[in-house]
Image (spheres, rainbow, N blue to C red):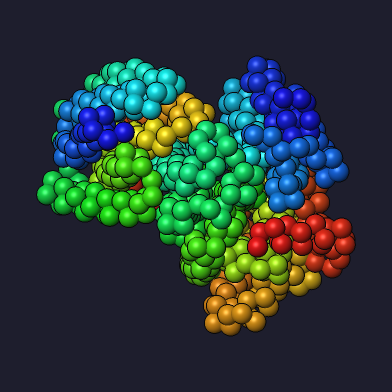
Amino acid sequence: MSLDAVTAILLIPAFAAALMAALPGYRATARFNVLAALATFLVALSLLFVRPQPGPYLHVDDLNNVFIVLTTFVGFTTSVFSASYIDHELEIGRLTPTFLRFYHAMYQILMFAMNLALVANNIGVMWVAIELATLTTVLMVGIYRTHEALEAAWKYFILGSVGIALALFGTILIYMAARPSVGEGLDAMVWTTLIEHAAAFDPALLNVAFVFLLLGYGTKVGLAPLHAWLPDAHAEGPTPISAVLSGLLLNVALYALLRFKMLLAANPQALAPGPLMVTMGLISALFAAFMLYRRRDIKRMFAYSSIEHMGIITFAFGMGGPLANFAGLLHMTMHSLTKSAIFFAVGHIAQVKGTQRIADMGGLTETHPVLGWGLVLGVVAIAGLPPLGIFMSEFLVVTSTFTRAPWLAILLVLAILIGLAGLFLRLNTIAFGEPRGPTAEAKASYVPMFAHLALVFVAGIYMPPALVTWFQNVAKLLG
Amino acid sequence: MRGLSFDIAHMLAGSLVLISFLQLYQDRLSALLNVFAIHAFMLTLSVAWQAYVQAAPHLYVTAAIALVFKAIVIPVALHRIIVRLGIHREIEKVVGVGTAMLIGMGLVALSMVVMLRVTAGADPLAREDLAFALSVVLLGLLMMVTRRNAVGQVVGFMSLENGLVLAATGAKGMPLVVEISVAFSILIAFIVIGIFLFRIRERFDTVDLQALDRFRGERR
């Protein structure tokens, strides 16, 4: 295999992980972590211009290119945030230098696994990559080794493994369906070949396979009622990991689902995957919106908000058609950027206050104006208020639904509004009013947070035509 | 494909389902581990037979991994762990034997109905194999749900994975990549679980997950 950009985005994190596991000195490794993530991002950008030919294992097309650029970008900004976050954790002794070595190596392995899942041209390799990503995040969630962290990691591990096992069964069924028309061996697991021959597959087998894949990868997307691991894993792990989980790993699982949806769409006799995804998406969005009200832990609250938004995105992709797909893609991008920005803010807030309990924080805009207003801005964005990017994408999802299924659109709007009210109720306590809790100065790096928010802000007002054309092409590809 | 070779494959896969039922009602951990070892051994036979019938030598590797790793190394290691933790004599029960068996039968019936119907076009051996494999997967899931003990859940998960290997080998010509990766992921999973068990032990002096239930996920 020659060395091109696709192999490079896999090799850089892999080598970086090996190196960081070996290197002592956490300050150097934190910087090195940033450097490796930056290099991966730059190489991923080059994929926009030069695209290697698809091979039997790896390929890049318009669809996964969106995901790759987004993943490597957020991976890079999170590594910057992580460097300042980790500094503080060491100071208060929550983590020891040995654990940090492990942490940084794991971070790069996670980046490797996510990139591999995205560029894999083989349904088997993709499954292995998602399994690897799951196992690394399990270890990272449990890294604090407190009672809560261990239970969260255990829950995540068990539910994640069951999901991943069901997905493997679905993958085997897809192979079974492909074998008669494609032939035995490797070819029957290659995406590019599968899509070409999909029309000839046995529809009944495809249907059953999709149900397994939806349940399996849906667990990883965090769709209700399979979401139980998500709030715990977000709340108990280190905050950079919460940002990566919400912003990236959920997307990667969704990407797998989208690929299989394309496969079913290419077969005229198979059942339409849309309604299944619409139902699960809507249930998740509504359920999570109601759950936002009684949250006492700030990270759990935003974890539920992630479930809500993944529900909206799945809903949009389930509706299908160029407009809804475009909206779903845009919403996914905006959600990744906004939610990771929020977690950057929340990480520093929790460090300053020494707790994640909402009741113990208050008046942040007075005591820590930059952090406080950053959080307010993030919540305004995530709640879907104009003129930010999420307003745009939610507006598109709702309007494209209204013309086709008004009742579903009403339910969706209801979920969005309930979620909005729930978020602002809590935001009011955290950001305004009487200052509560410690008021020590925050040693934070604000650049990643505001970089994300600025992008979201710009996207809400002006989208470059090149980006619009790109997303439109992908939307057409998704059918 | 028909005839003796089909019957033998059928019998081996069927006995895997039977042993899954045996696992369901074991109330002692050490007995459960022994039954799991038999489960893995039966998987080895089944995979080896498939390798012979399909003339696919790479499946022998999968069989060897199942034999060495799942039938010997893991049960022995888990035996040592539970002895060290002093829980090898404990009796645990969550759902009654009768209920668990009835649910299990329902699951097997379900998987037969579903798989035999949708795979009407495939060759008979693969059909039967898939139906049995799904039964083993579902029974593994049921076991994970009915066990409170961490070791019990792990065994449930591993027998679920056995079902997946059965399905993967039944699908003729499935590339080796997947089988090795399955075996490999089990290895990783086992290491992870091992670490967890020791950490849970080190912190709370118990591997009974009920002790962890105090934490309901929300700070008050």
Counting the numbered discs, the total is 0
Q: x and y percent of residue A157 in the render?
A: 44, 40
Is A396 rendered above or below residue B88? below
* Foreground residue among A230 and A181: A181
Relative placement, left or right, of A138 versus A73 is: left
* Foreground residue among A61 and B24: A61
Is A213 rendered above or below residue A9? below
State the residue at coordinates (76%, 25%). Answer: A2
State the residue at coordinates (81%, 51%). Answer: A451
Which quadrant of the figure contains the C terminus of chain A? bottom right
Is A157 rendered above or below residue B218? above
State the residue at coordinates (64%, 34%). Answer: A57
Relative placement, left or right, of A429 versus B202 is: right
Residue A275 can be seen, yes or no: yes
Q: x and y percent of residue B14 in the render?
A: 22, 37
Image quadrant where residue B35 sits = top left
Q: x and y percent of residue A421 in the render?
A: 60, 73
Q: x and y percent of residue A393 in the render?
A: 71, 67
Residue A243 can be seen, yes or no: no
State the residue at coordinates (71%, 38%). Answer: A54
Relative placement, left or right, of A457 versus B154 is: right
Which quadrant of the figure contains the N terminus of chain A? top right
Image quadrant where residue A116 sits = top right
Find the residue positioned furthest to the left: B98
